[in-house]
Image: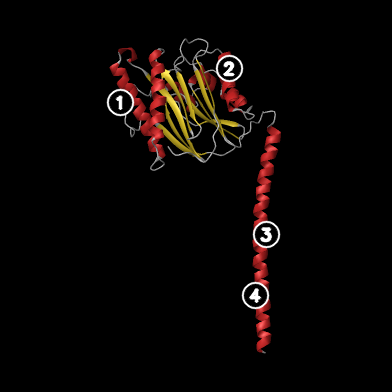
Amino acid sequence: MMETNTMWRAGVASDRGLQRSVNEDRAFADETHGVFLVADGLGGHAAGETAAETAVQVVQERLAAFDGEGDLEHKVREAISAANNEIYQLAQEHAECNGMACVLTMAVARDDRVIVGHVGDSRLYLAWNGELRKITSDHSPVGEKEDHHELTEEEAMHHPRRNEVYRDVGSQIRSADDPDFVETKSFLFRPDAALLLCSDGLSDSLTSAQISSIVESYDGDPDAVAQQLVEAANRAGGKDNVSVVFVPGPEFVGRMAANATAARQRHAVTRVRTGGRRWRSIFKDACLVLIGIILGIVLCIGIQRFWR
């Protein structure tokens, strides 16, 4: 897979929580190639762990073969459908894996653009300008009601049907072109923004405001943010596995970080200096043009006088 020109840094954390004996989540970050993924196994048994692990492995292998040619968004759909079919096949071959599946959210970052592949109720958030925006849609009855503002965020978090999903990876054979399977999106990514991928163990435990306050504490250590989010979910009850991948852009600065003011001043100085160089270059070019015009006028006057 082609490397991205942007130097990505990601914080990754995953924990089984306080009430589960097994961690069926998987979190993955390939900083070199800009690939980030969270998978959440379904079923409440060891097979869910196998499904999530298989999804990460297959997606990673499929994207590793991508040479940069063709449609990356379609390649993401192909990778997730390949993972789906591999999970389904394993479930048919091994009785202990019967019915296993997972949900997943992945982001492939290419310089100033992010391609998203999503199935289920794990999530991708975008943090920018002090706000946290949910990019993905929950493929669940309760999630739909929340997205349509029929339920408040806290009502949805505590709804008895919160864990039901109507899309998953692995329960049946799927194709990359199935319109009711993989949700894909593409959007421009600013260098002063950040991505947050998480399983529902985080979004069912913390409100978006609580998540945002931790993201905005970022002071240069993405692993610390990821770990703080997991710890906060556990303090809120730790009822589920929780996994987080936090990817700050190269100019992202948490608004509540201790060094936020100094960092913003550095970025502002950099922009002023860059702007200053640009205006100096424009002024220099304008002066050269003006000198050329003056020399041309002087030359014309001299020639006219000579021929007189």
Work out which quarter of the rendered image holds the C terminus and state it: bottom right
- Among numbered discs 3 and 1, the one appearing first in the sequence: 1
Observer-nearest residue: 121 or 282?
A: 282
* Cα separation between marks 1 and 4: 76 Å
Write down the quadrant of residue 283 in the picture.
Answer: bottom right
Return the residue at label 3.
283
Disc 4 or 2, which lies upstream in sequence?
2
Q: Which residue is mark 2?
A: 231
Residue 296 shows which numbered tag?
4
At 66% from the left edge and 76% from the top edge, which residue is drawn? 297
Marking on residue 100:
none
The kind of residue tagged 4 is Gly
- Work out whether mark 3 precedes mark 4 in sequence or the reverse, and give the earlier one: 3
Crowd around label 2: few <14 · some 14–19 · many ≥20 (10 Å): some
- Report the Cα–Cα distance between label 2 and label 1: 37 Å
Q: Secondary structure at mark 3?
A: helix
Q: Where in the figure is residue 173, as x and y percent of width and height? A: 30, 26
The type of residue carrying mark 2 is Glu
* Residue 50 visible within the image: yes
Mark 3 or mark 1, which is nearer to you? Answer: 3
C-alpha span from label 2 to label 3 = 55 Å
* Residue on which the image places disc 1: 173
